[in-house]
Amino acid sequence: MHSPHPRVLSKDEELGKRDDDFRPKRTSCIGFIDPRRWRKRRVILVSLVLGLLWLVLRSVPADMGTGVGRLVKERGSVTGEPTGAPPRQEEDQEDEDRKKQYYNGPIKFFRLATSLHAISRTMGMRAVNRNVLFAAASLRSVANLMSTACEMARWDRNYVHLALMGRDNMPLEEILEINGVTKEGCQVTFHDARADYSEYSSELRLEIAVAGAMKHVNDFMHPQAIIMDDSVVEEPAFTRAMRAKGKALGRPVIEIPKAGYERFLWITRLDAGSLGSWFKPRIEVLVHAPKGSSGSLVRMLKSFERADYEGLRTPRLTVELPSEIEPFAKRFLRDMRWPLEDEGGSQSGSGLMLRHRIPTEHLSSEQASLRFLESTYPSDGNSHVLVLSAQVELDRQYLHYLHYTVLEHYYSMYSTPQAGNLLGMALGIPQRSLNGSTAFVPPTFSAMRSPGLPMGTKADPDDPAPFLYQAPSAIATLIFGPKWAEFHAYLSNRIVASHSIQVTKSRKLVSETEPAWLEYLLELIRARGWYTLYPAVNFATVHEELTQVPEEFTREVEAGQESTDLLKQNDHPKEEAFLVADAAPVMLKRDEGKLSGAGKPLHEELPFDGDLPELANLPLLSYTGDAINETHLVGQRIAFESYFREHIGGCEAEDAARPRIVRPEIATDLFCLPGVEAEYAETAEDVEASIANILGSLRERPSAPEFAVPPHGLPGLGGSGTATVEEAGAATATAD
């Protein structure tokens, strides 16, 4: 058996005997173990080391942690965050300009983990959820945002969070107390996302810290929208980081304008799906100016310029000018700058487009409709068309109202089937019926199909209420992009049908004082079961002094003719699709109506404390002005659809009644055109798909999240996140 130390204990084991003269050599190991063989200087060295270690341990305070820093107590718990000023580098001490904000060290978040781990109820691990984040750096912005965040939480449509990401080191409890906010009275989850040494951080470190905090916040809650204060009030580094991070995450960063919180309080009524679509809707304003309307056109454009656009996406403007333009209108349009210049005198680009018509012979209703509809075309489902008459005067809040209603009814994650039938929104209450023969009486609150009121609101039975009306308006109406595109396809097929097959001419249902394209649109509305949302108060009014009959419905009077000898129907152009009256239309005087109260914020001007009732609860009127319900509307749609196919679409009676597959982008299901194969819905799946297309539910919109208890195993943030300035050129911070 070999010795464990053969070199020390044996000279030659093969001899098999003991060598009494052999003495083992001393090794360093044995020499060090045996105290009797220590050398004097080694003893002195070890003594010095032990003494120094004892002095170091004695100098450490009793509350010292494991190298993280002095422990501080916050909200009754130990965080491990260091206090005091961080050490300065030599270059920091020499640079007087940096003074207090000099620190560029690693970034850690000692106060963020606790609140993030506690928000599992908000389903933050799901990409689609109800989380909305308010974020602020300056204490002034925190004060501005708190009341809005608390109001949004009161409406209980979202899980509301507010994160502090600035320099100030004031405790969160003290900030809440100063602003008069209690956690019991304000159901907002507060997050202290300030980094260590925040008050000493350089601009770059603060920017990186904000981006790093947003990374952790997004990992845990995936906010659908981020709301912050005006950039002129906030810290520049914070603003840069939030804009960059919002873009990287694909989340809208909504900046509420300075002193605009009261005007924007309507955003507290929107759900997370609507707020997450804040920048999606794009509005193209289309104005058709007939002959002799230059005075009205200038007045309309001035009211358009005076409107409140701060904080919202500015719409583009297209003006269709007549063949003859008065000199003062030319000068006004020449000097008009749209969008308006900002404070710095810069513009984002020209948003004004002018179209000038070349004089032609008398237009038929078909030609006039084509010319008008070809003026614009939506690029996608988020591009919508606002049709304005030259005689309109707009309220300053018209865009606030449109933005609010579009986000609520078109982009909400809780959109109802009725939203698929919505053609768009009108800005004014009609004064007369579609045929112009009788006055229009708008419904009141007593006519609502479900009179339930939002919390804390009151209404009298005679109070005005918003309503759904199966009638289009050429005064001031926003038409959704997909519906406008389908109208394009429909009118193309309608013209092909009228020129290639025998089409029955029908009596006009829309007054000849209205443009011809409304008649074609009414046909499509009846065939699809659409309707328009009208407001309870006016956001646009019409001035009648310069109103005139549309060019396509004017009657030429020859010399010597009496008013009773005007052109008869059989003298009208053969391509006219509708039977027009023998007598020339007469413009009836209408009440111009009053605009909504000037100076009032939108939520105070609207009924029900600014809350928008569900479409299913609103009064529903047919195109004749009669009150109906959804069941009657579906029955009328099916009956008119069959009639239209047989008498206008060129179908045989048997084929006209068969269900068809609806494809809105081509709108051929209403016609039997030469060379176009009909697509019949032969199966239940085909019928279901056709109904879904009719309701518009195939349009992309976020699905409503499920609110079950999330599974265990949320990703841990740990105690902090960390990053170095040198490693964060893209303004990000990594987790430990």
Image: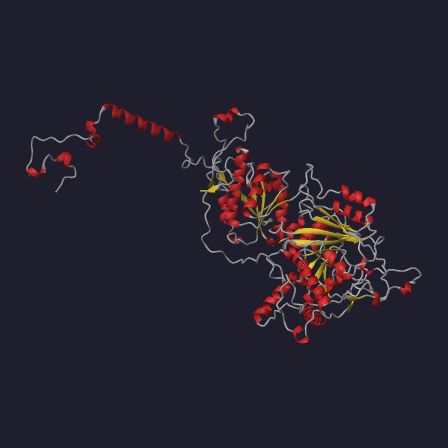
Q: Nearer the viewer, residue 659 or 439?
A: 659
- Place residue 305 in its image quadrant: top right
Image point 64% across, 41% down: which residue? 230
Q: Image quadrant for the N terminus?
A: top left
Q: In this view, does 601 lie to the left or right of 676?
A: right
Q: Residue furthest bottom?
A: 654
- Image x and y of residue 63, in percent: 43, 35
- Place residue 171 in its image quadrant: top right
Q: Is residue 441 left or right of residue 106?
A: right
Q: Image quadrant for the C terminus?
A: top left
Say whether residue 461 is visible.
no
| Image vertical order of residue 606 relative to residue 527, above or below | above
| Image vertical order of residue 191 relative to residue 361, above or below | above
- Image x and y of residue 259, in percent: 68, 42
- Image x and y of residue 8, in percent: 15, 34
Instruction: Indicate how the structure is coloured in the image.
Output: secondary structure
- Image x and y of residue 186, in percent: 60, 48
| Image vertical order of residue 3 relative to residue 671, above or below | above
Q: Is residue 96 left or right of residue 54?
A: right
Q: Is residue 362 left or right of residue 77?
A: right
Q: Which of 218 and 329 is in front in this view?
A: 329
Q: Which of 212 and 558 is in front in this view?
A: 558
Say whether residue 120 is visible.
yes
Image point 42% across, 32% down: which residue? 61
Number of numbered markers:
0
